[in-house]
Image (tube, grey):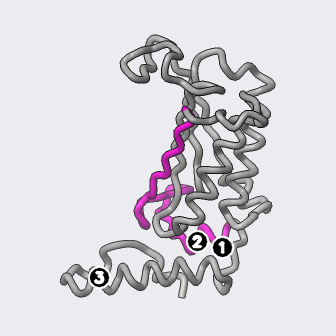
Amino acid sequence: MPIMHVYYPQGSLPGERKAALAQKLTGVLLQMEGNARTAGGLGFASVLFTEVAPSDWWVGGRNDATYVAPPGKFLVRVSIPEGYMNQAHKTEVHVAVTAAIVAVAGNPEDPKQGGSVQVIIDEVTEGNWASHGRTISLASIADTVGLPKDGERFQWVRAYFDAKARQFAAAGYPADVGGLLKDSK
């Protein structure tokens, strides 16, 4: 259930470019969900765009392009459920998002492209995501998008939350602190 929020300079993504970038980033979102090209996966694949006025975006103390690499200033915040990605998965997202922006707004043949594309992955703590007015777990998201819970990816997720539960128990936290994943077993 990742969501991408793309901040970009005003006027740098005219209609067809924005649509092309939305398609490419939706592909990245679906890939992040284990290639969940299902109705559930598509229903969770949200890309939000926010234009930023030139006078509101400063790099290196300047609001011009002095310290900005082509194709320009882009900030992409990717919200993902906690424990869903290891570092290799996160790096794949960093690379894919940057490549999508460079492909649409820049020159993919130029190796200097993308230096000013910032991609930040925000993990939403398990139990803090809701849909349809109810709190949902990573396990229920997996059910919705069609990610098998007996596959390698979800086994990693289980291991993450088992380790977290052991840490919380060792520290004396109540059993219901720290998430909902246990409802998936």
Mark 2 and 1 residues: CB-CB less than 8 Å, in contact? Answer: yes
Labelled pair 1, 3 in contact (Cβ < 8 Å):
no
Q: Which label's residue is closer to the chain start, 1 or 3? A: 1
Q: Residue at x 53, y 70 (%)?
A: 138
Residue type at the position of mark 2: Ser
Report the side of 146 relative to 117 (left or right).
right
- Rounded to the nearest angstrom, the CA distance separating label 1 from label 3 is 27 Å
| Label disc, if present, on residue 143 of the rendered structure | 1
Q: Which three-letter amino acid code belongs to the residue tagged 3?
A: Gln
Tell me the kind of residue under disc 1: Asp
At numbered mark 3, what does the secondary structure look like: helix, strand or loop? helix
Does residue 37 appear to the left or right of 78 in the view shown?
A: right
Callout in the foreground (2, 3) = 3
At 57% from the left and 35% from the top, the residue drawn is: 115
Residue ID at (78%, 59%): 39
- Give the numbered dot on residue 140: 2
Measure how far apart labels 2 and 3 are at the Cα level: 24 Å
